[in-house]
Image (cartoon, rainbow, N blue to C red):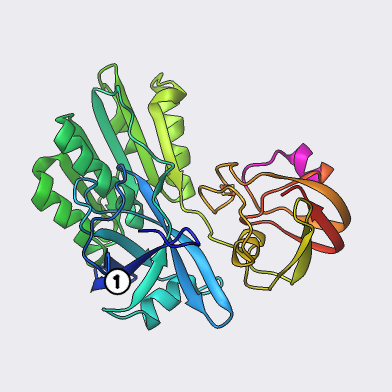
């Protein structure tokens, strides 16, 4: 099913506006064949065409892992940045063909939890959707606590409430309803796990509340909203193993530029958080612009490593070990 570049072709079968900012895309195989399987919490990287190539943005899969006749992703239209989500919103139509990569999972469910608690804000509910489908089949109890700004942002939560009933708790900010994270976590039985996906403050509040209640890190799981790709000044990089020199344009990440030129750099999150793309810097005449959350401050100062999915360089010469 994958072609020689490792991508899969999919057809856009349906596009729905589910909130003022979010569209849900349903993707199917052009020949109707099943798509590769995935597990709850997985991401799908979509190649978004633009004038001189393609952006590679990762989106949470929200459909059931037990239905591989289609994939569903939710895309929030981001007004700033390089425009990948805007292209999906504004130019992709039903029936169009896209390329995607095989799903990867950076936010998997715990195999041993007796109760799964989900805390989510806004579009952070999307990875939870596929996780709930998996839990229902496993027969493991769960609760979802979803904060939204107002009724027009609550459609995904309401869909979940129709599907899973009282396990779904919605908090409408414009009606003064407040999600009290500490209260949600209080008094839970041993063997409970908490998952949080939302703004940075919500993640910090959940981790702090869980620690205050004596939860250990192995029972706390979170997924950040990641800035995809990278924009900045153009630069060139030499890939030491092949000797090839790759030009990184202003709206491309180093990772995307290498991929477009046919070179493979391992990746998972594409947002500077997972560490998978960490690459040694062999030679540098200039400075690196580190924008990842992975490398330590000491590593960033030493300039011996770079995360090509988000970080860039301002330099006359850069040679990396790949
Ligand atoms: S792919 Fe995750 S940090 Fe680069």
The answer to whether residue 209 is left or right of residue 128 is: right
Looking at this view, name the residue that lies furthest to the top: 190
Label 1: few (<14), some (14–19) or many (≥20) C-alpha neighbours in 10 Å: many
Residue 206 seen anywhere in this rendered image of the structure = no
Secondary element under disc 1, as helix, strand or loop, is strand
Q: Nearer the viewer, residue 288 or 264?
A: 264
Residue linked to disc 1:
11
Q: Quadrant of the N terminus?
A: bottom left
The answer to whether residue 68 is left or right of residue 124 is: left
Residue 60 placement: quadrant: bottom left
Image point (63%, 63%), residue name: 253
Q: Which residues are magenta?
A: 293-301
Coordinates of residue 11 in the picture (x, y in percent): 29, 71
Coordinates of residue 231 in the picture (x, y in percent): 64, 68
Q: Nearer the viewer, residue 126 or 150?
A: 126
Looking at this view, name the residue that lies furthest to the front: 4
> Please, is residue 81 above or below residue 102 in the view?
below
Coordinates of residue 222 in the picture (x, y in percent): 43, 39
């Amino acid at each position: 099913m994958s072609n020689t570049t490792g991508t899969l072709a999919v057809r856009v079968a349906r596009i729905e506006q589910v909130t003022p900012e979010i569209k849900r895309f349903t993707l199917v195989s052009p020949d109707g064949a099943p798509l590769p399987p995935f597990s709850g919490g997985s991401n799908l990287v979509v190649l978004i065409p633009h004038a001189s190539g393609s952006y590679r943005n990762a989106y949470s899969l929200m459909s059931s892992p037990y239905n591989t006749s289609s994939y569903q992703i939710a895309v929030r239209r981001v007004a700033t940045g390089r425009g990948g989500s805007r292209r999906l919103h504004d130019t992709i139509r039903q029936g169009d063909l896209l390329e995607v990569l095989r799903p990867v999972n950076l936010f998997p469910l715990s195999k041993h939890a007796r109760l799964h608690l989900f805390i989510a804000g806004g579009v952070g509910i999307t990875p939870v959707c596929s996780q709930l489908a998996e839990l229902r089949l496993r027969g493991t109890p769960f609760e979802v606590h979803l904060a939204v700004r107002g009724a027009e942002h609550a459609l995904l939560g309401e869909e979940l409430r129709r599907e899973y009933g009282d396990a779904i708790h919605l908090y409408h900010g414009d009606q003064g309803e407040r999600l009290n994270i500490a209260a949600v976590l209080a008094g839970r039985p041993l063997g409970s796990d908490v998952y949080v996906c939302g703004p940075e403050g919500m993640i910090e509040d959940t981790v702090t509340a869980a620690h205050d209640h004596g939860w250990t890190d192995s029972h706390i799981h979170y997924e950040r909203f990641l800035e995809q790709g990278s924009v900045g000044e153009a630069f060139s990089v030499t890939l030491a193993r092949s000797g090839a020199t790759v030009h990184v344009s202003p709206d491309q990440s180093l990772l995307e530029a290498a991929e477009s030129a046919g070179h493979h750099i391992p990746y998972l999150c594409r947002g500077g958080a997972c560490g998978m793309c960490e690459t040694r810097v062999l030679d540098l005449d200039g400075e690196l612009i580190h924008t990842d959350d992975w490398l330590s401050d000491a590593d960033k100062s030493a300039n011996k490593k770079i995360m090509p999915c988000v970080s860039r360089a301002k330099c006359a010469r850069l040679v990396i070990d790949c």
